[in-house]
Amino acid sequence: MIQTKMGKIEGIFLVLTIIINHIILNLPSEIISSTSSAAPINIIFISILALLFVFLISKLLKKFPELDILDISEFLGGKWLKFAFGTLFFLYFIVSGSIVLRCFTGNLQIIYFPKTHIAFLLFLLVVAIGFALKFGFSSISKANLIIMPIVLISILFVFIANIDNFTILRMTPILGNGFNSTFLSGMSNLFAFSGIAYLYFIPPMLSNSKHYKKIGYISMILSAVFLLLSTSTILFIFPFVAETQEVFPLYVASRFIEFGRFFQRLDAFFLLIWIISLVSYLSIVASFCLTIICKITKISYPNFLIPLLCFTIFCLGLLPQNITQTHFLETTFYKYIVLILIFGISPLLLLLANFKKARLKKKAGKGEEINETTA
């Protein structure tokens, strides 16, 4: 169970880690597939929506300082609602983490290990996650402070180093397939900011509750910037998204980077950084899964659950038969679960909890007035 207190920078990097790892995989390609040449405009649009959403949940959580969404669900509907919401988020975290793990290892197999069984690659990464969990969330969070800046620099470097390979005209027509795909159906690309899910859980973990808004806003702005850079890199280099579907496109873009005869094939270096980033991401996801289990079962020391959790992630990662099924899960199941659970059901729960608290406060006020009148 996460008992440590996080600072502002740790909180920002935690949320950022979730979104950045999806960016490293196929998130930019998914946005380009749905919005075509209007992808940069769509990203700016959904980024504004994400910031507005962070503003909304900050307001809704203001009346519940140092409580997460599970505590608030218990206030609203009792232990059964807390258990239901805890189960939903646990399944969301562990399934989404397993999808990302399977997608990454599938691409890794295609690039470097075509003769290696996928189970072996999954096993190595899951063992790394298990070791990280043994050190505790505090160590994972502090290690992430070192890892994430390097990952961000790598993405920025891929963008800058490829500028000479850009064809800016690929951004035309400006509205891509039209206004509808850019702004109306394009709103579904809000799932790109799935890191918002973790904002529902971090209030009790913060050393200073006043940092909550800053963590939300800064993490969303940085996520938007790097999503825009990554998507622009892919859009301006590749004539068709389909050409990069077999492996994650940011890796393919890194293979275009050359600095003379002595600095070639830097893609292996970037891949190493992104593997470390993936382990950090999955360790955070697993830590939150353990926290949820502790909250809904009242287990105080969950270390004995770490092998079982790692085994579950491993088994779920083995379920997709091939990379096509993994892409399908990533672009359909994951996308709509995020939209429904994070952007639909969760804010509705917070809204209802605010109404209940206001009603109870109003009743308490009336009770005090009656007591004063009687006296």
Image (spheres, grey):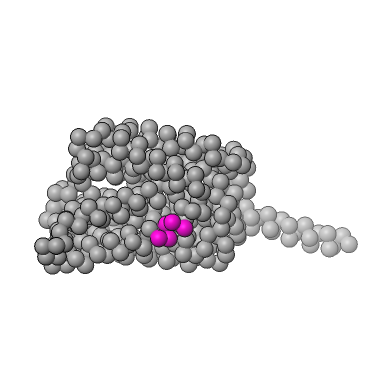
Q: Nearer the viewer, residue 30 or 38?
A: 30
In the rendered image, the vertical position of residue 81 relative to residue 178, given as above or below: above
The residue drawn where x is 26% and y is 33% is 117
Residue 86 makes an appearance in the image: no
Quadrant in the rendering for residue 301 = top right
The residue drawn where x is 23% and y is 49% is 248
In the image, the segment drawn in magenta is 142-146
The residue drawn where x is 56% and y is 58% is 5
Q: Nearer the viewer, residue 351 or 79?
A: 79
Task: Give coordinates of residue 338: x percent, y percent.
Answer: 39, 48
The residue drawn where x is 56% and y is 67% is 210
Residue 249 makes an appearance in the image: yes
Q: Nearer the viewer, residue 347 or 108?
A: 108
In which quadrant is the C terminus drawn?
Answer: bottom right
Task: Give coordinates of residue 27: x percent, y percent.
Answer: 28, 52
* Dominant SS in magenta: helix
- Whether residue 359 sits left or right of residue 274 in the image: it is right
Task: Give coordinates of residue 317: x percent, y percent.
Answer: 34, 36
Quadrant in the rendering for residue 97 = top left
Quadrant in the rendering for residue 159 = bottom left
